[in-house]
Amino acid sequence: MKKHQFVCKALFLFVVLIGLNACVKDTIEDVVDDTVQEEEDDQEDDFDESAIVNLVIPEGFEFATSTNTTITINDASPDAIYTVYAYNNAQFNPTERNVTNDEGEPDTEFSFDTDELNQVLFTGRPVGGQLVYTIPTPSYYTQLYVRRKEGNVFSSEIIDMAGGTATYTHSDMSGKARQAEVARFKSQRRLSYARNSAIKIDSLFCVNGSGQLFTVNPLNGNLTNLAAMPLGSYTAAIDHDNMFLYSIGKNSGNPLMRYDMINDSWSTVGNVGMGGPRLDFREEDGLLYFSTGAKVYTIDPTNATVLSTWDINNLDVTAGGDLAFAEDGTLFLSSFGGLYRLDLDNNNVYQATRISADNLPFTPTSMTFDSNGELWLASNGSSSDLIIMDTVTGGWEYIYGPNSDSGINFNRTINDLTTFTYNDVEAEDPDTDGDGIKDSEDEYPEDAEKAFEQFTPSKYGWGTVAFEDLWPFMGDYDFNDTAINYRFVAILNAQNEAVQLEIHFEVTSDGAGLTNAFGIEFESIAPNQVESVTGTVLTEGYINVAANGVEEGQDRAVVILFDNNETMLNVPSRVDVRFTTPLSVAQLGIAPFNSFLIVNRDRGREIHLPNRLRTTLGENNLDIEGINQDPDGNYQTDSRLPWAINIVHDFKVPKERVPVNQAYNFFNTWATSGGTQYNDWYKDNAGYRNAGNLKASQ
């Protein structure tokens, strides 16, 4: 039964909601007759200081869950490309599980989740020596993770956010020095090939839990010992551009170890904090991809920082194995259950598709693609076998080891292997669309008008705008009348100007008995600065739109995404807004912009976030005497409670008639502290939620 069948009584104090008789309300005005008397009756009830209407909210607090921060990047190089993440080094949902390790012994593996906002906020490049964006980040974040790429050189730094600003100035030259060293080494190697007319072949680099590092010649099986590792490991991955091999130690904090292939020496970068069997390096983003159990992580090899986490579905066996990227970028995973292809779905989850049958000759502990695109796998025996597998059919063939016909035994374990190839010619990185951004760094390499992206709240995260729709009357503060999940993607050109806005959204709750619409006002954009709007769903006949898709009669550009919340429930949707000329990101504004609800087909009755202005077509409704709880029209009551809240998170709304402070245990503390305490109150941390008071997905 919908909530507005219960609003006859208790529009002010929620402690009297239980036991009220239900009656149907067809319009908001139906509640007016009983309201004054109910208020007088409620004043006779015992005072409950924990009730949401009795909270003492500090003056000026607007129930904001995010902080707008202006990020300034100073860099004189016009070829530098930046990727900026919201960063939080806290470990969530730590898990320890019993496994059989890559040496076939009982062991334990530790894993954790990174914060889901540890994802890309924006990409861009300095123009005129600077890159400046203002972005919203959750209030509990205090740091940003800045990654820089120039050519094939990556660097990174964690910077602080304070007072609404964050600044990074580039000065590091170590990457260029390494590139010069690599260039000299490869030049000498080419001269050696030329003098000796030698065949240039791959090298299979192998590691094991005993701390051995060695290479295997794939043509003849010859083995060459290299510098011993600081700590035994089950992982290995190579950065070809910088000629580093990376490996994660199997114990003692799981240090990320780096092997210098030019100087045959090891160093330790830092502790990863968890161990596991699977690792590969992705040249496109300069990151290590690490996997344990049913999770994939990215790790920055320059400082061992764990950035992002993905779940894996459909693994039959989650222990053992390895990761490997094919030449076309496809990610493969092997476990003790066989070989799988991993595909990232729309929910940011890797779906595993099994490639190999269940007739593998051994449980694979490692794998790598060679320069011919063939997949090598190794066993974990005391004298390991090497096989080659077809990734399409799952067929395989012994090459080396005690079970092969080669007569070559290594007499040692291979717990992981990776491939290195000396390339005489550097891979071409064209600029197909001619916008000055190389294809590998261009999100739209075939469109000269587009290059970079800015995300709110993040590349994979969702935010929620949730409404109480009885304004200007008091509601019950379950914030489930209409709740909309959103992700905004501003598409920018090579000069960091906005040319298009993608609005991804989904109505996640329709707790109202009213037909509500949802719109967005761009407060610094005129209607004629919008070229087109596509994807809106308008069926009720009272929203008038111009030829370019914006609402008519507005002083500023307004886009109504839909006009019937019930028909949009659980329907993933997208609206595209194209601009007539590129806009600065400052003029575009900060998402979710001036979001608002239109209540029950009454175009003038708009509900906004606190202290946001109504649109040209909005009305104040000051004529409702004795009932209006927002006489000043700032969308907060005299006790400062809002009718709308923006949460930079996928918000799980409370059940019908359950105030938000009864579903979330630290809401009261957050609100009465003015947002200084428990500013992550909405998350699924231990003790934060009363799951029984949360609404199930509709």
Image (cartoon, helix red, strand yellow):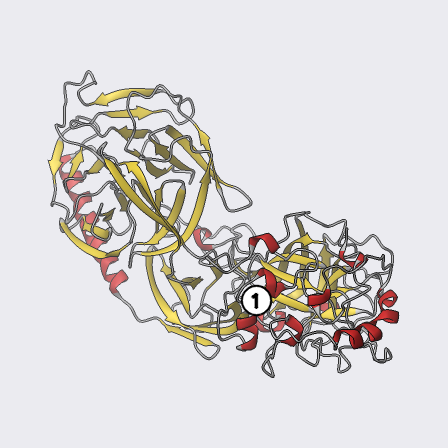
Residue appearing at x 23%, y 35% in the figure: 415
| Quarter where residue 427 is shown | top left
Q: Quadrant of residue 556?
A: bottom right
Secondary structure beneath label 1: loop
Q: Residue at x 63, y 49 (%)?
A: 696
Residue at the top extreme of this rendering: 405
**Most foreground residue, 469 or 429:** 469
Decide if residue 285 is on the left or right side of residue 558.
Answer: left
Q: Is residue 592 above or below residue 279?
A: below
Q: How many marks?
A: 1
Look at the image and tell me whether residue 284 can be seen. yes
Instruction: Determine whether 392 is above or below 146 in the image.
Output: above
Foreground residue among 515 and 640: 640
Relative to the observer, which residue lies in front, 528 or 105? Answer: 105
Whether residue 420 is visible: no
Q: Is residue 229 left or right of residue 441?
A: left
Q: Residues within 10 Å of mark 1 (few under 14, many from 20)?
A: many
Picture layout, residue 348 above or below residue 605 = above
Q: Position of residue 684 (x, y in %)?
A: 50, 56
Q: Is residue 49 left or right of residue 242?
A: right
Residue 246: percent from left, percent from top: 25, 48
Left or right, 12 with reference to 234: right
Residue 198: horizontal and vertical position, in percent? 17, 34
Report the residue marked by disc 1.
497
- Residue 244, image x, y percentages: 23, 50
Q: Is residue 371 above or below residue 557?
A: above
Which residue is pictured at 42% across the width and 38% down the height? 328
Q: Amino acid at mark 1?
A: Glu
